[in-house]
Image: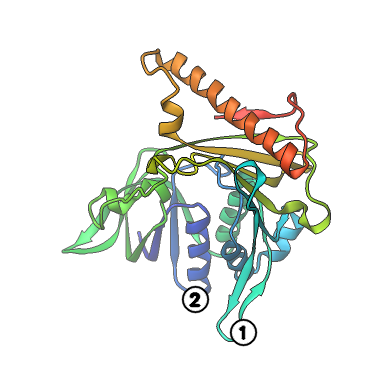
Amino acid sequence: MKTDVAIIGGGPGGTAAAMFLAQTGLRVTMIEKAQSPRYHIGESLTGECGNCLRALGLEKEMTARRHPVKYGVTVYGPRGKNAFWVPVKGWHPESGLFDTHTWSVRRSDFDHMLFTEAAARGVSVMQADAVAPLLNGDAVRGVRVRTNGGTVEDIASEVLVDASGQATFLSNAGMIGEKVRGNYDRQVAVFSQVAGAIRDPGAASGNTLIFYREKDSKRKDRINEAMGIAHAEKSLSGEIQETVRVVGNSAHLLDKVNLRKTTRQFRVQLVKLAQQELMLALIFRAVVIGGHHDANAGDLVV
């Protein structure tokens, strides 16, 4: 099989790249091993993501799907001090920065929308697992894939785009630099969906709230070790609910967990500890920001 561009990964990055390339008349093949729609986290879109969706002509679709609109983020320090506002901005080469908005989304719905839209715009979609890059000397000239049925097929392309996300296909194949994990590789995140939460009034109801619970300047790996993120999200029934995520440094969490327990005991203890962190974040939000939480309404997902 031959194509102009082969893209590994059918998430937002892969599908957006596929649509932009297809607009130029190129033949694009997108390889994704997971069945769509599929569960994923990462619900709060940046301003640039919103601009990208507009450039693809999808703003009307985003509005029709009633994704909560986000105009910015309010960040709260420990105990509610030193709060500051970060607005969503766009940028124009002639006029510079301007106010705009973006969205918070349920990823299964959002990703599936992009996936089906890419196919509708002429992108060839293949459900398969990328096995290895095809080489012509030192140049990458495509990818070998294995379909869900077990068939191995070579896709020759002028350009191969790695949009595999954390899978880092080309890095794992030794074709580009070593994977750099940064400061986020030792974090654990849990989140809960809260029904009936009090949001900010009016147009601000979709804005994201970030609050740091503590800061330990003596340990570099524990700076901002507990961070809560709250944003609006459309539920499966179409109602707007609040999603609260607590992100903690895994060293901070694991220091409190007995590593000698069995795997099941370890996971249960970790979940209980994460629930404590989550409740602290919810209490913080209720006291400092003015929301409330029904303990029977939240579902914890790990």
Q: Which of the numbered marks, if any, corresponds to residue 95? A: 1
The number of numbered badges drawn on the structure is 2
- Element on which disc 2 rests: loop
Query: Residue placed farthest to the right in the image?
Result: 202
Image disc number at residue 29: none
Packing grade of label 2 (10 A; few <14, some 14-19, many >=20) is few
Is residue 132 among what the camera can see?
no
* Relative depth, front residue between 239 and 184: 184
Residue most toward the left? Answer: 137
Please indicate whether residue 264 sits to the left or right of residue 100 in the image: left
Q: Quadrant of the C terminus?
A: top right
x, y percentage for residue 120? 59, 61
Quarter where residue 52 is shown: bottom right
Q: Name the amino acid, label 2.
A: Thr
User: Distance from label 2 to label 1 (Cα)?
Assistant: 27 Å
Q: Position of residue 289 (x, y in %)?
A: 74, 44
Seen from the viewer's position, the closer of residues 291 and 64 is 291
- At 37% from the left and 18% from the top, the residue drawn is 259
Callout 1: SS:
loop
Question: Residue 48 location, x and y as percent?
Answer: 57, 65
Q: Amino acid at mark 1?
A: Ser
Residue for badge 2: 24
Q: Are marks 2 and 1 in contact (CB under 8 Å)?
A: no
Vertical side of 302 occupied by 60: above or below: below
Q: Residues within 10 Å of mark 1 (few under 14, many from 20)?
A: few
Is residue 118 at least partly visible in the picture? Answer: yes
Mark found first going from the N terminus, 2 or 1: 2
Q: Is residue 19 above or below residue 287?
A: below
